[in-house]
Image (cartoon, rainbow, N blue to C red):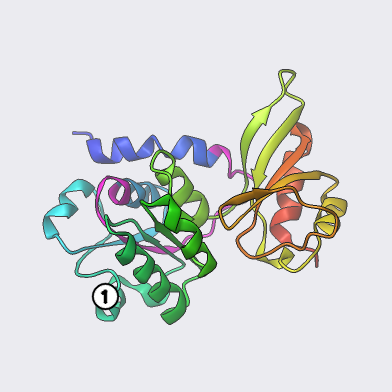
C-alpha cells in the first residue's frame, strides 16, 4: 500500500530538483521543529532527498502525520530546549527549520540552533509578516508567506541553484533569484556583475526590495534577482555559488 503522506510530500520535489541540478547536494542531518502539515511534508521531502531527519514536537500524536514509512527520529519535547535538541541530533545538524504554530517559539528555537549549536542553515516560519523584518535583523532568515512556505523552506535549508520569476515569450531572457554564496558578502554588486556577466536587477534585503547601484555592498541574507539569458543560467549559478576567490 502506498504511503499517502509521503506521496503528497513528493509533490514538492520536482520543482525544487529542477532548480538544483547543477551540482550534487551534500547529505545533511536536518532537525525540524513542528510536525504540522508543513513540518511533516518538509520532513518527508528531506528524507526522500536522502537526508537524515529528526522531527521535534510537544504533542506525540502529531507524529502520525509522518506516516508509517518515515525512518527518521521522532522527538517529543520543546524545540528550544537544549536537551531536546541534543536528543534530536542538533550537534551534528547541517540545517534547522522551526515551523511550529508559534512565532515566538519558532524564533527562539532558531536562535538557539544558530547561536548555541552553530547550525549553518537555519530558517523560521513566521505567521505575522510585520514581525518578519525584526527577526531578519537578528540574522535569522524567515518565511512569512503561507502559500510558499514549504518550497521556500527547502531553498533556504539547502541553498543552491536558481528560481525563475519570469521568462520572455521567446524563452531567451530570464529574471531569476540566484543563490548567492556567503563568500560574496562584503563585495560590491559591480564585482559580482562583472564576474558573472549579468545584470542584478534587484536585491531583497531584510524583506524589502531595492535597486542596487554599482557601489552597493552585498550583505548577509541578500536575495539577488538577476536578469540574464537562459543559456547562461548554469554558468551564472556556478559563479554565484563559488564566490570571488574562484
Q: Is residue 20 magenta?
A: yes
Q: Residue furthest top?
A: 169
Q: Residue furthest left?
A: 61
Residue 68 in sight from this viewpoint: no
The front one of 50 and 135 is 135
In the picture of the structure, the residue carrying the numbered disc 1 is 87
Q: Residue furthest front?
A: 130
Instruction: Describe the element under mark 1 as helix, strand or loop.
Output: helix
The front one of 84 and 131 is 131
| Residue at position x 29%, y 41% in the image | 6
| Residue at position x 62%, y 47% in the image | 161
Horizontal relation, residue 112 to residue 36: left or right: right
Q: Is residue 40 above or below residue 74?
A: above
Q: Is residue 127 above or below residue 182?
A: above
| Residue at position x 67%, y 56% in the image | 180
Q: Could you say where residue 172 lies in the image, as x and y percent from the top left?
A: 77, 26
Quadrant of residue 163 within the rendered picture: top right
Quadrant of residue 226 within the rendered picture: top right
| Residue at position x 23%, y 34% in the image | 2
Instruction: Say which quadrant the C terminus sits in.
Output: bottom right
Q: Could you say where residue 119 lies in the image, as x and y percent from the top left?
A: 46, 72
Q: Residues within 10 Å of mark 1 (few under 14, many from 20)?
A: some
Horizontal relation, residue 92 to residue 7: left or right: right
**Stretch of the chain drawn in magenta:** 18-40
Q: Could you say where residue 133 lies in the image, as x and y percent from the top left?
A: 50, 59
The front one of 50 and 84 is 84
Instruction: Say which quadrant the N terminus sits in.
Output: top left
Residue 176 in sight from this viewpoint: yes
Quadrant of residue 88 within the rendered picture: bottom left
Give the mark count: 1
Q: Is residue 55 magenta?
A: no
Q: Is residue 2 above or below residue 145?
A: above
Amino acid at each position: 500500500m502506498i504511503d499517502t503522506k509521503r506521496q503528497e510530500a513528493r509533490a514538492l520535489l520536482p520543482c525544487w530538483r529542477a532548480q538544483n541540478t547543477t551540482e550534487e547536494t551534500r547529505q545533511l542531518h536536518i532537525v525540524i521543529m513542528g510536525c504540522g502539515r508543513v513540518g511533516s511534508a518538509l520532513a518527508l521531502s528531506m528524507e526522500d532527498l536522502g537526508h537524515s531527519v529528526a522531527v521535534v514536537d510537544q504533542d506525540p500524536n502529531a507524529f502520525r502525520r509522518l506516516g508509517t514509512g518515515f525512518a527518521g527520529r521522532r522527538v517529543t519535547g520543546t524545540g528550544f530546549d537544549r536537551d531536546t535538541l541534543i536528543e534530536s541530533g542538533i550537534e551534528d545538524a547541517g540545517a534547522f527549520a522551526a515551523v511550529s504554530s508559534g512565532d515566538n517559539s519558532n524564533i527562539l528555537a532558531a536562535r538557539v540552533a544558530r547561536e548555541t549549536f552553530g547550525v549553518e542553515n537555519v530558517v523560521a516560519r513566521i505567521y505575522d509578516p510585520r514581525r518578519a523584518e525584526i527577526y531578519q535583523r537578528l540574522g535569522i532568515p524567515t518565511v512569512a508567506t503561507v502559500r510558499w512556505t514549504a518550497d521556500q523552506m527547502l531553498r533556504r535549508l539547502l541553498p543552491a541553484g536558481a528560481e525563475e520569476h519570469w521568462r520572455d515569450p521567446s524563452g531567451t531572457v530570464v529574471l531569476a533569484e540566484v543563490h548567492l554564496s556567503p563568500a560574496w558578502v562584503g563585495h560590491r554588486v559591480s564585482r559580482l556583475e562583472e564576474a558573472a556577466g549579468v545584470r542584478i536587477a534587484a536585491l531583497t534585503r531584510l524583506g524589502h526590495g531595492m535597486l542596487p547601484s554599482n557601489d552597493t555592498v552585498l550583505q548577509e541574507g541578500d536575495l539577488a534577482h538577476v536578469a540574464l539569458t537562459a543559456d547562461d543560467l548554469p554558468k551564472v549559478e556556478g559563479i554565484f555559488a563559488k564566490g570571488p576567490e574562484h
